[in-house]
Image (cartoon, grey):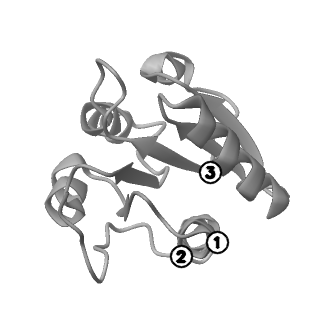
Amino acid sequence: MQKRILVVDDEQGILNLIQAILEDEGYSVQTSVDGQCFQNLQGDLPDLILLDIMLGGEDGRDLCVQVKQKEETRHIPVILCSAYFRGDIITYLAGASTFLPKPFEIDDLINTVARYTSSTQEREPSFPETSRER
């Protein structure tokens, strides 16, 4: 069964790039430029959420906390990403599964998504081996 990924970023170019990369890897990808997509998260839920922190007026960390507070969505791994923040503390405080610093290598994106969409992966938060501060 094809894994479903929800990618939320306010830059359409980044959304298009990530969508192309992940669809090429066999994922079904839904994109959104804002957090409105979280208002209707029910039913056919994504297997993973890739969420930018800075969403032009919205904070991805707050959206992550909202996802993790709802019983029906708390099991969904959330990968926070940003070019402006250090990941380890943010990941922990928001309840995200991990952090992906921007700009990222395509292989890092693919490997991170694969890690959190595999059926046997542990769903506890983890921290990147190295974090970059911007």
Q: Amino acid at mark 3?
A: Asp
Mark 3 is surrounded, within 10 Å at the Cα level, by few (under 14), some (14 to 19) or many (20 or more) other residues, namely many
Q: Amino acid at mark 2?
A: Gln
Residue 40: x, y in percent?
55, 18
In the displayed structure, 30 sits above or below 121; it is above
- The residue where tag 1 is placed is 118
Dot 1 or dot 3: first in sequence order is 3
Dot 3 or dot 2: first in sequence order is 3
Q: Secondary structure at mark 1?
A: loop
Residue that appears at 49% across and 50% down: 76
Mark 2 is surrounded, within 10 Å at the Cα level, by few (under 14), some (14 to 19) or many (20 or more) other residues, namely few
Q: Quadrant of residue 118?
A: bottom right
- The residue where tag 3 is placed is 47
In the displayed structure, 53 sits above or below 83; it is above
Horizontal relation, residue 123 to residue 4: left or right: left
- Distance, label 3 to label 2, CA atoms, is 12 Å
Q: Which residue sits furthest bottom?
A: 129
Q: Are marks 1 and 3 in contact (CB under 8 Å)?
A: no
Numbered label attached to residue 59: none
Q: Secondary structure at mark 3?
A: loop
Which of these two is toward me, 86 or 77?
86
Numbered label attached to residue 121: 2
Horizontal relation, residue 65 to residue 8: left or right: left
Residue that appears at 49% across and 34% down: 9
Q: Are marks 2 and 1 in contact (CB under 8 Å)?
A: yes
Locate the C terminus and report the quarter of the image it occupies: bottom left
Residue 121: x, y in percent?
53, 76
Q: Secondary structure at mark 2?
A: loop
- Distance, label 2 to label 1, CA atoms, is 6 Å
Residue that appears at 72% across and 56% down: 22
